[in-house]
Amino acid sequence: MDLFQPVNTLALRTRKRSRLPHLLISICVALLYSFGVLNGLEHKLMDLRFNSYAHTTTTDSVLVGIDSKSLRELNKWPWRRSLHADLLRKLTASGARRIVLDIDLSSSSTPLDDSDLAAAIRDADGKIVLPVFKQRIMRDKKSLSYTEPLAIFAQHAQTASVNIQAEADSLVRRYNRVEPWNGGLVPALATQLLGLLPDYFDPFYLDYSLRQETIPYLSYVDILNGQYNEGEIKGRTVFVGATAVELGDMLPVPVLGSLPGSLVQILAYESLKAGRAIERTSPLWSLISIFLLSVFLGPRISAWSWRRGFCVTLGAIGLVYAAATALQAAAPLSADISPLLLVLTLSYVWSLIQQIDIQSLGLFRQHMAAVHNRALMSSVVSESFDGIIITKSSGEIRFANPAACSLLGVDMDELTTNNISRFLQVDITEETESFENSMTGSQAQVLVKSAPVEVRTAGGSRIPAEYSVTVVPLVLGQSPFEVRTDNRSAYIYTLHDIREIQKVATLLREAHDQLEIKVKQRTIQLEQARDEAEAANRLKSQLLTTMSHELRTPLTSIIGSLRLVKEGVIGTVAGDARDLVGVAWKNSVQLAKLVNDIIDTERFEAQEQKLQLERLNLAVLVGDGIDLNNGFAKEYQVTIVADGIVADAYVLGDRDRLLQVLANLLSNAIKFSPVDGAVGVTLKRSELGFRVAVSNAGEAIPLEIRGTIFDKFVRGNNTDNRNVGGAGLGLAISQAIIVEHGGQIDFTTSDEKGTTFFFDLPKP
């Protein structure tokens, strides 16, 4: 945008107003998000993403389940602890790397069984991990009960917390890395098995995209009976826990419905081990995103149509969801997109509300415009001087204005029961058929325009009038409520009473005839005057030409004789007589120049002057002209200065006539230059071709003669009272010569001193 362009403040205010609702939406969503109201929605979105992809486990875990089969075959519950001891010995012998015995050992059994299990744990050499857990006391909800294995079991085993807490929706989603325990911390089972101190203690989300069917499963009783492959145990972490539903250790989880507690512990361990411990993205990212959406996309959605807005909103939601799914599948990150989706949805809902308001306003305006138009049209039709009749295509009259009723001599009620054919004998069948065959829209069409007709009134009289017919198609509507099956048309007849017009036309024809007679008489008089003027002008031209020719011969003899006397060729003349002879010779020369100028003027006006064109170099011509006028300049104590002369200025011209133009311009400049002044001459290139300019520093040309300076017998100012001579024909002749060459001549002058005359000639 142009930084110097004026700012449209109204547009800026409108833009701010359009963004304000979307900013308010983003603020409200941000508050809901910050206070955790959207956590439930975020969890549902996370669950949907778990269903969109799948990961396999690390194959490091094996689940040994206390299942229904084991309960049925062993036929007693709770089992003797010696069975657990046998199980541990078999697992240890099979090469298990770790054994998690997810069974409550906080109370004593028989001394023999307890000793047997303790010995099995001791023989496992630290591979056994036993659970600890805490729970609230039923009678005192603020107090906690800590449950640990008996010391006889715990002294040779590792312990870890198996506490799992459900979310507000009662589903297990997160897993604690460590658990507070009597003022300290105890590692959770998955953390203990991983064997690494966590970088931070925040809980993580379990990755329910891990395929639990890929976790090897063995029945408790099959291990006791030796019905298993040791390869399934060797080098792996074995989880021993209840999987039978009747034992009650089932936890509600997303995606999968419910899982045994031991299997949830395996998923937690596998999530950590596979690097799939899912964390949610920073809230700051979501807040920035919803702000950007509200500023940039929200107003655009409001500006678009509801269809385009819906498509864009749906596409944006799909794009955001797909991006979050791809991120969660590629990395252990769950993007919080619920604020973004909510902002997009609310922005679109707001745009719908705005469009509904706009449509309501538009409908209101259309309704009011229709009301006003009906009132206006009713007023126009009622007050019209012309009669207006509206009929059906059959000719049945449906409406007539007061002027039509007055013209036909019938009131409105009686008129609407008649057909138009009663009053007008017109046939528009051909025009109607042509229109109906070509009708493609709702555009009105004129069938008849200003045709003469005789109107028959109700009283039987006939009135001369002009009529026009316009047909307006009433096309079928697009609404489902339209019940018509065929298009209809309304015919509008306009009747104009021309009785007064005919009277005025008769008067105008009579006046026109009289005016034509007077115009013819005046034309004859003007033609006679023109002929007399042309004859007088020809007589004047012949007289001037004859006088000029008659004067030129004796003047030539007089000038030659006076020059011989002045120069003393025929003898010496006394001083006073010599001066008088000089004056006579000078005046004779001026008179001869005047005669020549008059003859040239007449020839140019009569288009009898023919140019002798040849290729000329204006630079040489200007030099010759200056040389020819240097003597004249010395008489007036003026210097001619040539400056800026283009060397190769070739044109097609008449040398003598162009020298005549240059002599006229130089002589005028010299005569009107101050004593000891200078006349400048330049020759430069111009748009037309070449420009010759002659300038002086004399008095400016008076304002009153600047517009007529090139007319005949117009002379410049003579403020220094010197005898500048001339009859005012030089510039007129110069203009005629230059125009005949296809050029142009003009001048520039200042308000005080200095004038420049110039002429342009085209290149050959």
Image (tube, grey):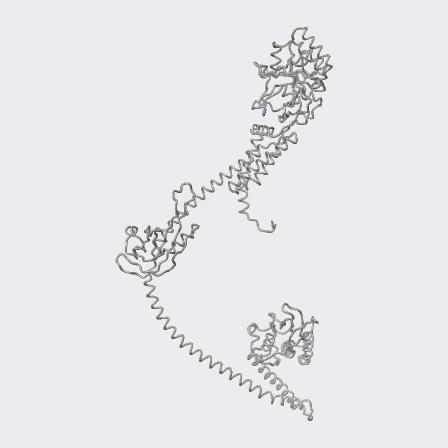
Q: Position of residue 53 (x, y in %)?
A: 62, 30
Q: Where, quadrant-wise, is the C terminus in this rendering?
A: bottom right
Total marks in image: 0
Please determine whether, in this image, residue 312 is positioned above or below residue 628.
above
Please name whichever residue, 612 or 542, is drawn nearer the observer in this view of the structure: 612
Q: Is residue 21 left or right of residue 208?
A: left
Please name whichever residue, 254 or 214, is drawn nearer the observer in this view of the structure: 214
Please name whichever residue, 166 or 90, is drawn nearer the observer in this view of the structure: 90
Please determine whether, in this image, residue 141 is positioned above or below residue 452.
above
* Residue 33, quarter of the rendered image: top right
Q: Residue at the left extreme?
A: 459
Q: Position of residue 60 (x, y in %)?
A: 69, 22
Q: Residue at the top extreme?
A: 111
Q: Residue at the bottom extreme?
A: 571
Q: Is residue 381 left or right of residue 658?
A: left
Specify whether residue 756 is in view: no
Residue drawn at x 72%, y 12% as measured from the top left: 122
Specify whether residue 83 is in view: yes
* Residue 581, quarter of the rendered image: bottom right
Q: Position of residue 6 (x, y in %)?
A: 57, 51
* Residue 403, quarter of the rendered image: bottom left
Q: Position of residue 634 (x, y in %)?
A: 68, 80
